[in-house]
Image (cartoon, rainbow, N blue to C red):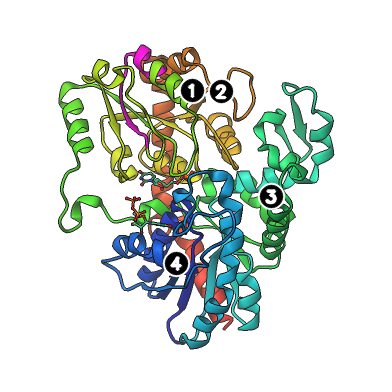
Amino acid sequence: MASPHILLFPFMSKGHTIPVLHLARLLLHRGAAVTLFTTPANRPFISAALSDTTVSIIDLPFPRNIDGLPPHVESTDKLPDMSQWPRLAVAAKLMKPYFEQALNSLPRISFMITDGFLGWTLDSAQKFGIPRLVYYGMSNFSWSLSAVASQSRQLLIDLELDNDKLFTFPSFPWIKFSKNDFNPEIVHPEYQDKLYREFVLEHVQATAKSNGIIVNGFYELESVYADYWNREMGPKAWCVGPLCLAAPPRKKQENYQTPSWIQWLDRKQEEGKPVLYVAFGSQADISREQIKQIKTGLEKSGVNFLWVVGKNQVEDDDGFEYRVKDRGMLVKEWVDQREILEHSSVQGFLSHCGWNSVMESICAKVPILAWPMMAEQPLNAKMVVEDIGIGLRVETSDGSMNGFVKWEKLEKVVKELMEGEMGKELRKKVKQVGGAAAEAVAEGGSSWNALNELINELHAER
Ligand code: UDP
Ligand code: UDP
């Protein structure tokens, strides 16, 4: 049998692309040929990340002049405002004829793994008789609970007036939820515009008809939820992660120069000062007022911190950077987050709980201060704090999921993690979980085996 040829098509955002680049490496390692689809503006980032591999990259023309989208933006993390993202996702559908042209000219394809938000690729896959697996970048925990919550919408709506009321779902009687654990979109799809609702419906239906789901996680972390999903929901979830463990070590790459923030962390290590890493992913929009509270909270806590501010503007109109210069560093560039998390002086992570950040933190054995901001992040935060037990929740002032956080709450929880007994316990626990993650991806581990089975099963069918 010829070796497998696997096609990958990640969605146009860093959070959906980076893990798929790691997956490409795993597939190459199993002897597969890999072709990866993207768009012209996203190509340089991907080519650079995969420059040491044989992945062949095809960029399809991305539609121009779409209403409500700035020209030349082909990625959600380049959008000035995240509320525009459904437009970008819908525009992506216009790539379909180019995608099919490319499928026509490629050597025989064993199967494709395309992003959940590219639901239209199922139709192309079916036309060409190619199995399609879906990548969403969500845990089984979030998958299962989002599905159960959508099925129980009326229950959630009935709780409308009482945000703090706790309830359970019959399938998961051991977890107490409040309405704030769910993104309002799940409870009230009608709040979203028509374009978005149709888009969601389309990609959810396409997922249901696909051949499986690739989960960036490992079975032992969430066996109950993986089993539930495979028994009650489907299509079959394949847990093949944490994918970040497939990334090559940074220092082995050619032309490596130690970035200034890593040098700073080295100095903190010499001083024996633990550092809190602060970052909210590639796309969260954070208000000016909220940024002020973060500054005050970090300053009052007295801890050492490295804050990657990303696309959010942190204005230095109050001398903040000068006042904290001995113990705080602000970074405005793109960083290698794994390299930071793996630095031994980093002892805590204030995170929005994007699923990649959670996986990377676990693998680096760093406990989390969970501050979810959008999408399925509240469920990730719940899992981190209550289910896995490797973090503390940052409280919002009104208890709502994406509410405002006052500096006093932030200061308190930062000190608890960095200086308190609780922090020590959580560090112990995350070491165990991180160890289990490494075992899962090692030869003979659950993720290793799952990837082999997946390739054998789908390739043999063809
Ligand atoms: N990029 C991307 N998607 C886009 C636009 C740009 O991934 O829609 C990537 C691009 O490949 C490059 C990086 O972002 O690696 C910087 O792009 P840009 O030209 O926008 O420069 P910036 O102003 O962000 O430094
Ligand atoms: N990331 C990075 N450097 C940055 C910002 C983000 O490497 O400066 C990576 C981070 O390590 C993670 C991804 O971008 O792999 C962000 O994904 P996540 O799910 O954490 O959050 P999102 O950006 O999707 O909200």
In the rendered structure, find residue 289 and report the number of the disc placed on it: 1
Based on the picture, tell me whether residue 306 belongs to the magenta stretch: yes
Disc 2 target residue: 404
Spatial separation of the CA atoms under disc 3 and disc 1: 41 Å
Ligand 2 within 8 Å of the CB at mark 2: no
x and y percentages locating residue 384 in the rendered image: 53, 34
Which of label 2 and label 3 is nearer to you? 2
Query: Which mark, by number, is residue 39?
Result: 4
* Camera-nearest label, 3 or 1: 1
Q: Disc 4 and disc 2: Cα gap in Å?
A: 36 Å
In this orientation, which residue lies closer to the viewer: 211 or 432? 211
CB within 8 Å, label 4 to label 2: no
Q: Compare marks 1 and 2 and give the one earlier in the sequence.
A: 1
Foreground label between 3 and 4 = 4
Q: Position of residue 396 (x, y in %)?
A: 57, 21
The image quadrant in which ligand 2 is located = top left
Q: Are marks 1 and 2 in contact (CB under 8 Å)?
A: yes
Nearer mark to the viewer, of 1 and 4? 1
- Image vertical order of residue 345 relative to residue 457, above or below: above
Give the left or right position of residue 178, taking residue 343 as reference: right
Q: Neighbour class for label 3 at 10 Å: few (<14), some, many (≥20)?
A: some
**Foreground: 342 or 263?**
263
In percent of width and height, residue 341 lies at: 33, 38
The kind of secondary structure element at disc 1 is helix
Q: Give the residue type at disc 2.
A: Phe
How many labels sit on residues? 4
Q: Residues within 10 Å of mark 4 (few under 14, many from 20)?
A: many
Q: Decide if residue 10 is on the left or right side of residue 420.
A: right
Q: Which residue is mark 3?
A: 228
